[in-house]
Amino acid sequence: MFFNRAANRFRLTLLSARHRRMAGAVAVRRAAEMLCRARPGFVLPHPVELVVAVESACQLKCSMCGIRKVMKRPEFFGRRITRADLLPALTEASKWRPRPYLKLTGGEPLLLGDGLLGMLDDAGRLGLASRLSTNGVLLSDAALARALVKTGVDAVTISLDGPRDVHNAIRGRDFAFDRAALGIKNLFLARKSLGSAGPLIMVSTVVSAANHHRLIELFGILKELPIDWWNVQLINYVSEKARDEADAVSKSFGFEPGAWDAFVNEPVTQVNPESLAEQLMAVAGARKNFVLSFLDAGGFSPRSLKAYYGGSEIEVSPRFCTVPYLAMHVVPSGDMVFCIDYPHVSYGNIKTHGLKDAWKSETARKYRRYLEECRRLTGSNPPQCQRCNWLYN
């Protein structure tokens, strides 16, 4: 086990040297998080991370995806952010020091086509590190994969949740696995043929009832694919009790209830904690040719995993969420929110507001006071936030 941990760190060091701009952005983000944890309530002068959901639509039907349900709400359905919408925000952010890191997500961002490629071109030209999160299906087109590499995007994360049968069942399409796997290969070949160091190729896996017992099989598949990094994360969800408590707390601060119902999904949380712990430990202890990371919520013991997936309202982690103090998230309507997954309160819109003005607005301050009051009264984050992967990123 020690050898494999050391080897993992060595691979991470090599990746950091190869992808310096991305490594620098991650280092700034981590330093900002440490500062915000050390000084609760401290707000950075400007965000060091911009997360933008540029597209509300997606061609997959993922069983565990609360975002898909949120994007069907009238304020988001059919909405998208254009290159012209985003450029003023990127231009403003490029003048800050340190410059923020840009993550583009969705929905499925590659549905924007040339518009998405243009956004990444703009980010690179303005000196911003960038990352794209995608289901990978459209990257089965080798020409698109090559065009994506040419933008200079620093990292691309592709979702793979299990072997072919598992992934396709979770994603709701029988072509999902093969096209995503081909997309990974196309990215690697384009990177190689263009002589480009980037993008870093990452696979992300969300652990749910459908795949928690098949992670070792997926590990074997990933060893045969040209990836740089595998990230395994526990699922975002909200229990019915947490949903009801979140609504009550929101109303007490004068906020409308959030879209918590989209994340109440009991079937996908029916995980055998003993089996999951066994799978995770086996993967962690095996030799591998890529970096491996887990979003660790309290350890991988059956007890902690049972607490996480069992709906218990015990505090899974003492960590407080620092995202509202260091990151700006933007949804497809252009609204600036504090959480891309739970777009609860808007404090501005990139089409009409400057980033810094919105960051320091009274609505933003009021929401941070709401978070701080929750912590003061309960010693915890708001009820809806207990099982959010941003806490463990």
Image (cartoon, rainbow, N blue to C red):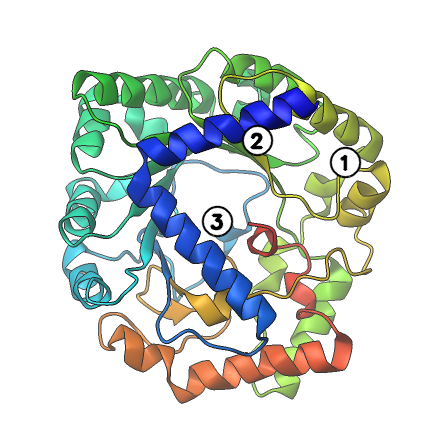
The disc, 2 or 3, on the residue closer to the chain's N-terminal end is 3
Q: Where is residue 202 shown, x and y percent of the image? A: 43, 31
Which residue does the numbered mark 3 point to in the structure image?
A: 68
Quadrant (top left, top right, bottom left, bottom right) of the N terminus:
top right
Which residue is drawn at the image coordinates 62% and 27% (left, top)?
Answer: 5
Report, in whole angstroms, how far the alpha carbon at label 1 lies from the one at label 2: 15 Å
Position of 279 relative to 119 (above/below) = above
CB of mark 1 within 8 Å of CB of mark 2? Answer: no
- Tag 1: amino acid: Val
Which residue is drawn at the image coordinates 69% and 76% (left, top)?
Answer: 375
- Tag 2: amino acid: Ile
Which residue does the numbered mark 2 point to in the structure image?
A: 170
Front disc: 3 or 1: 1
The disc, 1 or 2, on the residue closer to the chain's N-terminal end is 2
Residue 33: assigned label: none
Q: Which is nearer the eye, 74 or 63?
A: 63
Which residue does the numbered mark 1 point to in the structure image?
A: 271
Position of 175 relative to 126 (above/below) = above
